[in-house]
Image (tube, rainbow, N blue to C red):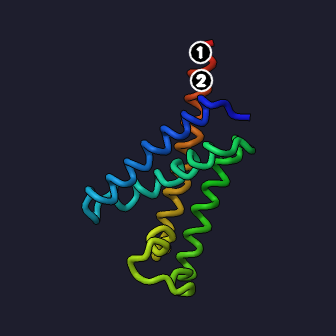
Amino acid sequence: MQTKSERKYYLIWSAVLFIIEFMIAVFVPSPSWLRDYGGDMLIIPLIYCLVRIFLNVLPRLMPFLMCCVGFAFEIAQYFHICDLLGFEKGSVMRIIIGTSFSWIDILCYIAGMIIIYAGIFIRRKIRYETT
């Protein structure tokens, strides 16, 4: 069971990551490394934090599961799921799912998962050193 402070922690991180993602999407020109890969690396930690606000099920496995969610979206892009479902260009669902498969995106999702595990390790280390 999560405490209120843990939920608040993940809510704050969700907001911070969402703002960063939004700023990258709006203000960083494409093509650039940050626009093309930085957002993909941060989306997995963002999804993880959003899920952790509500769930504390399998917390050690959750980063891997969130990475698998990213893989699922990428596979959906490979099979042109947006076209198959008839989502129009510029629609919210087309933006959320994406339309172009990339192996580099898969690597970015893995990097995002590593960022989560590093954050968990650092948070635990800080928590144990202060007690």
User: Which residue: 48% across, 67% down?
Assistant: 96
Q: Most extreme residue toward the front, as rendered? A: 4
User: Which residue: 38% across, 48% down?
Assistant: 19
Packing grade of label 2 (10 A; few <14, some 14-19, many >=20) is few
Q: Position of residue 37 (x, y in %)?
A: 40, 58
Instruction: Give the SS element for disc 1.
Output: helix
Which three-letter amino acid code belongs to the residue tagged 1? Glu
In this picture, is 57 found above or below 24? above
Q: Is residue 74 left or right of residue 88?
A: right
Q: Position of residue 13 (x, y in %)?
A: 49, 40
Between residues 68 and 92, which one lies in front from this camera angle? 92
User: Which residue: 40% across, 81% down?
Assistant: 89
In this picture, is 80 found above or below 24? below
Disc 2 and disc 1: Cα gap in Å? Answer: 6 Å
Q: Position of residue 30 (x, y in %)?
A: 28, 65
Packing grade of label 1 (10 A; few <14, some 14-19, many >=20) is few
Image quarter in which the N terminus is found: top right
In this picture, is 87 found above or below 95? below
Q: Which residue is mark 1?
A: 129
Q: Which mark is residue 125?
A: 2
Q: Is residue 35 left or right of residue 4?
A: left
Image quarter in which the C terminus is found: top right
User: Mark 2–mark 1 contact, CB under 8 Å?
Assistant: yes
Residue 49's image quarter? top right
Which three-letter amino acid code belongs to the residue tagged 2? Lys
Q: Which mark is residue 45?
A: none
Instruction: Give the SS element for disc 2.
Output: helix
User: Which residue: 59% across, 73% down?
Assistant: 75
The number of callouts visible is: 2
Q: Position of residue 58 (x, y in %)?
A: 74, 44
Q: Most extreme residue toward the top, as rendered? A: 131
